[in-house]
Image (spheres, coloured by chain):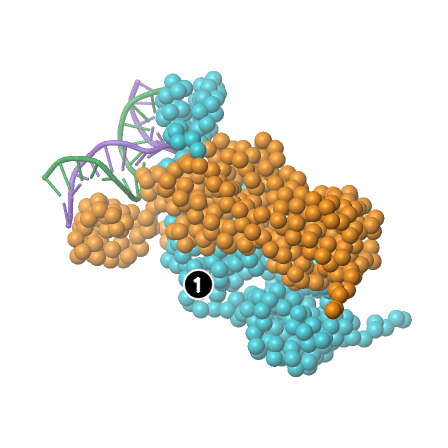
Chain colours: A orange, B cyan, C green, D purple
Amino acid sequence: MDTSRRPTLKDVARAAGVSLASASYAINGSGSVGEATRAHILQVAAGLGYRPNTSAKAMKTGRTGVLGLVVPDLTNPFFPGLAQAVLQAARRQGYSVLIADTGGAPDEERAAIRFLTDHGVDGLLWFPIDDSSPRGRRASPELDRIPVVVLDRNLPDHDVVLADYALGGRLAADHLIAAGHVDIGVISGPTAASSARDRAEGAVRTIQRSARLAWHVENAFSLDLDPAVTAALDRRSVTAVIAGSDMIAIGAMRHLQTLGLSVPDDVSIVGFDDIPWAALNTPPLTTIDMPIEAMIGSAIETLVQRIFEGPGVRSQTVFDVSLVERSSVRPLVRAEVR
Amino acid sequence: MDTSRRPTLKDVARAAGVSLASASYAINGSGSVGEATRAHILQVAAGLGYRPNTSAKAMKTGRTGVLGLVVPDLTNPFFPGLAQAVLQAARRQGYSVLIADTGGAPDEERAAIRFLTDHGVDGLLWFPIDDSSPRGRRASPELDRIPVVVLDRNLPDHDVVLADYALGGRLAADHLIAAGHVDIGVISGPTAASSARDRAEGAVRTIQRSARLAWHVENAFSLDLDPAVTAALDRRSVTAVIAGSDMIAIGAMRHLQTLGLSVPDDVSIVGFDDIPWAALNTPPLTTIDMPIEAMIGSAIETLVQRIFEGPGVRSQTVFDVSLVERSSVRPLVRAEVR
DNA sequence: GTGAAAGCGCTAACAA
DNA sequence: TTGTTAGCGCTTTCAC
C-alpha cells in the first residue's frame, strides 16, 4: 500500500505550470484551454496518476453521476438479473449505480434509502417491499427530494414502470383452461405487493369465469410454503395451480412431490417471472415472462429525464408479458385431431 | 418532489441558536457540548430533517464509511449469497458497501475498481476474475492506495482469504473412489482462477493415485459447456465426473441427459460451491461447501483492521471445506454388510 | 462548554 | 485563453 498522498488538481496545476482553473477545464473538457495546454495538462495528470476527488466534485456541483437501486433481496433469483440490467442501462446513460439490498425488511429499506440519498445519488430506482400500507408507500422523506422511479409496484406518488400483471394472471389461467383444467388453485404472492395482487386477480377472475377456483392462498415470494398453502395443496382438490412467482411454483412442486404427486402428470403448475431456474427445473417450468431489460431501460430513461427536467406529470409505463410454455403443464384432454 | 434546499449544518446551528461547531459536536457526539444544548440541537436537527452531507464529511475526514465489493458476475448464483454476507458483515462493523459487478470482463473490472476508489471507499473486497496473468493481478494502480482484501484467488500482493480448494478436490475424489468409481473425469473451472486450479489439482492427484483419470477438461464457470467438454462427456468413458463448480456440474448433468444417460444411475457427479440450486436440482447435487459467511466475516475483519492499522505483513487465511452428500453420486459396489 | 475560522478539493464566475 | 478567487458543507484547532 502506497501511503503517499493522492495528487490533487492543485498538484496537477503546479506540475503543469498552469492555474487551477486551466487544469480543471482541461480535465473536464469545460471552459476553454488552448489545445497545447490541454494536452500538456492531461499528460501531466496521467503521469501523476491524478484522479478527481468525487466528493469534492459532488459538493461543488451537487451531482454525483450515481444512481441508487433499492431491491428487497438479491438472494431471490429474480433480482440479480434485474440488477445487472440496471447496471447496464445506467452505464449507457453515463451513470454508475449503488445497489442496496434491504433483505425484505421495511426498516432496512428506509435505512437503505437514507444511505443512498446521504451518499448523494442523483436519482433512485426503487423496487419497494410493500405498497399496501401508507407506511410502505412513503418509506422516507428523502424520497421527496430526489427523482425516484418505482419498479413493479404501482405507487401513486412516483413515476412507475410495471408489467401488465393482470394480463399475466389471465394468460396463465387461460393456458390452463385451454389445456382442459377445471379445478384450479392459486397461490398468490404477498398481497402487500400490488404486482402480486394484480397477478392473482387476473388469474382468479378468469378462473371464476371459465373454470372453478378451488382455493386461493397467499405465500411469501419464497420456496418455503405457509401452512395454509401446504394445507391447500394437501387437499388434492386441483389438477392445476397458478403460482405468484417461480419461487413459489418450485416450492409448491417440491411439496407436491412430497405428497407423491407428480408435476405435470398429476398436477400442472404455472409460475411467474421466468427466473433462470425456471428452465432448469425438472420439469422445466411454464411461466409468465416480463421484458425486464426493456422495463429497466425505460425506467432509467424516465429517471434520467427527471434528473434533468425536474418534476412533472407522473408517468406510468406498462409492459406486456407473455407466456413461456415449457413442461409443467399437461393437457387434460387430448387435442382433437381432425 | 420537494425542491426546497436540503438543510445544512449551518441551518441547524442557526435555527438552534448555536455555533456551527456546537452543532457539529452535538450531531457527531464528538467534542463537548452541554447536555441541554446537545439535546436541543438534536431536536432542531430532527425537526429540520437534517442529514449530514456525506461528500462534505468525506472531504474533511478522508473517510467515507463505505467499503467496496468487486465481483465478477452477480448473475452467477454463487455471488448473490456472497454479496449478502458481505453486506451483513460490513454492517456489523459499521460499514456500508458499494457493490460493483464487472460482468467477467477485465476492462470492466479495472473500471469498477477505479469507480469505487474514486468514490472514496475506505477499503476494497475483491473477488478477481483472473489471477494467472500479471495483468489480472494488478488490475489497477488504485489498489496500492487503499486496503484491499482478495477473496478466493491467491494473489501475492494482498491479504487473501481462501478456502482449502485442494482439500475440496481431494474430498470429492475420495468420495467417488470410496463409492467404487474408477473411471473418473474432471471438468475444472477456468485455469485463470487459482481456486479452480487448486480444486482440479486436488482431485486429479487423488484420482491418479487411487483410480483412473479418464480425462481432464476445462470450462467457464457456466452452465454452457465447451465443445471439448461435451466431447469428453460424449465418450461415455467414465462412471463419475468431478466438476469445478455447481454450475458446471448442472450443465454437465443436462448434457448427460441429452445423451440418454441418467445421473446418478449411469454417471455420478460432484460439484463445488453448494449454490442454492444444488439442493433443488434433480437429483440434488452432491457438492463441496465452503463456509462463506465465516470467510466473509474474516475478510471484512482483516479489511477493517487494515483500514485502522495500515499496511503490515500479508495475511493468508484459509478455511476448511466439506463434502455435502446428496443424491448425485451412486455407489458402484454395495457396501459389505458384515 | 462554546464559538470563530481555516481549509479539505473542486468548479465556475469573473477579471485580466 | 488563462488566472484569481469565492464558496460548496463539514470537522477541528484554538481561543475564549
Q: Residue at x 39, y 29 (%)?
A: B4
User: What residue would you read off at disc 1?
Assistant: B106
Q: Nearer the viewer, residue A257 or A271?
A: A271
Q: Residue at x 30, y 52 (%)?
A: A50
Tell me where residue B124 appears, x and y as whole percent.
46, 51
> What amino acid is found at the position of numbered circle 1 in the picture?
Pro
Tell me where residue A191 appears, x and y as whole percent.
66, 40
Examine the rendered structure and indicate whether residue A139 appears above or below residue A241.
above
Tell me where residue A165 appears, x and y as whole percent.
61, 47
Disc 1 secondary structure class = helix
Regarding residue A228, the answer to whether it shows in the image is yes
Is B120 on the left-hand or right-hand side of A285? left
The image quarter in which residue A44 lies: bottom left
Q: Nearer the viewer, residue A300 or B96?
A: A300
Regarding residue B249, the answer to whether it shows in the image is no
Q: Quadrant of the C terminus of chain B?
A: bottom right
How many marks do you count on the picture?
A: 1
Q: Quadrant of the N terminus of chain B?
A: top left
Tell me where residue B165 appears, x and y as whole percent.
60, 65
